[in-house]
Image (cartoon, coloured by chain):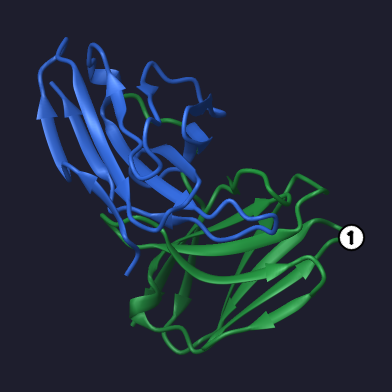
Chain colours: A blue, B green
């Protein structure tokens, strides 16, 4: 079982609210990722981080923002939620070694904006 | 909300048959490849990986084949079981870089 945790698992929130999706890992991994995935659809990278104080936007444009103040913590924030943000958000981490290593995923947060 | 991207292709197999799931990758600099399995309502889980200095690697009931010439990766599942029903994603990474996921295939196992 991978030591990466996402909270909450499910969130229903009203339009215009600010929300933060939490992601923590206890493996000491340098790289962390946020993916957005709709049911039955592809995984889309929206943010990633190489390490503390490093954040980059991914392939898919997103109105969310991230921060990486501590190695183990990579929260994702939506300043003003909209129904178009309804989706599943998956957090992952991997070791930042010279040779590629697998990414471990959290269970995901299913967000519904009403 | 509006769905992001394309619906995943589906592979339907009979229980007990072998399954072959294919993936085309894009970056010729990628030297590490992974197959993930994602069950409904869960995050993707690691199945098997392969490095570019190999063309075949076997696990328990699974085999990954890598053809670097045509940038093609495949996952073979022997004696497919109902518990194998899931979405399967391939992922690639050039050394030291970020993981990039392929489109994924939904495997449905008929009893």
Q: In this view, does A103 lie to the left or right of A25?
A: right
Residue B97 lies, in percent from the top left, at: 67, 44
Name which residue lies at 53% across and 55% down. Answer: A95
Q: For the residue carrying disc 1, how many other residues have a C-alpha within 10 Å: few (<14), some (14-19), or many (20+)?
A: few
Q: In this view, does B111 lie above or below B28?
A: below
- The residue that label 1 is drawn on is B69
Name which residue lies at 34% across and 78% down. Answer: B83
The answer to which quarter of the image holds residue A83 is: top left
Question: SS at mark 1?
Answer: loop
Name which residue lies at 40% across and 42% down. Answer: A71
Q: In this view, does A63 lie to the left or right of B55?
A: left
Residue A84 lies, in percent from the top left, at: 30, 19
Residue B57 lies, in percent from the top left, at: 68, 80
Q: Is residue A17 above or below residue A102?
A: above
In the picture, which quadrant includes the N terminus of chain A? bottom left
Q: Is residue A113 above or below residue A94?
A: above
Q: How many numbered badges does the structure rendering display? A: 1
Nearer to the camera, B37 or B11: B37
Name which residue lies at 31% across and 32% down. Answer: A75
Seen from this angle, which residue lies furthest right? B69
Nearer to the camera, B100 or A40: B100
Q: In this view, does A80 lie to the left or right of B97?
A: left
Chain ID at mark 1: B
In the picture, which quadrant includes the C terminus of chain A? top left
Residue B108 lies, in percent from the top left, at: 40, 68
């Amino acid at each position: 079982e991978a030591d990466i945790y996402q909270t909450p698992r499910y969130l229903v929130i009203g339009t215009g609210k600010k929300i933060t999706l939490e992601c923590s890992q206890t493996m000491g991994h340098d790289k962390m990722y946020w993916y957005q995935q709709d049911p039955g659809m592809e995984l889309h990278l929206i943010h990633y981080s190489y390490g503390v104080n490093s954040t980059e936007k991914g392939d898919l444009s997103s109105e969310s923002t991230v921060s990486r103040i501590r190695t183990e913590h990579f929260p994702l924030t939506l300043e003003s939620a909209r129904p178009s943000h309804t989706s599943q958000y998956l957090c992952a981490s991997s070791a930042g070694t010279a040779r590629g290593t697998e990414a471990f995923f959290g269970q995901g947060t299913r967000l519904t904006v009403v | 909300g509006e769905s992001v991207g394309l619906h995943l292709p589906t592979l339907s197999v009979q229980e007990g048959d072998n399954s072959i799931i294919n993936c085309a990758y894009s970056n010729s600099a990628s030297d590490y490849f992974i197959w993930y399995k994602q069950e409904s309502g869960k995050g993707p889980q690691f199945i098997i990986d392969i490095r570019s200095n190999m063309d075949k690697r076997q696990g328990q009931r699974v085999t990954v084949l890598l053809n670097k010439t045509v940038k093609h990766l495949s996952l073979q599942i022997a004696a497919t079981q109902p518990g194998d029903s899931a979405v399967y994603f391939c992922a690639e990474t050039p050394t030291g870089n970020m993981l990039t996921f392929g489109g994924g295939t939904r495997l449905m196992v008929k009893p």
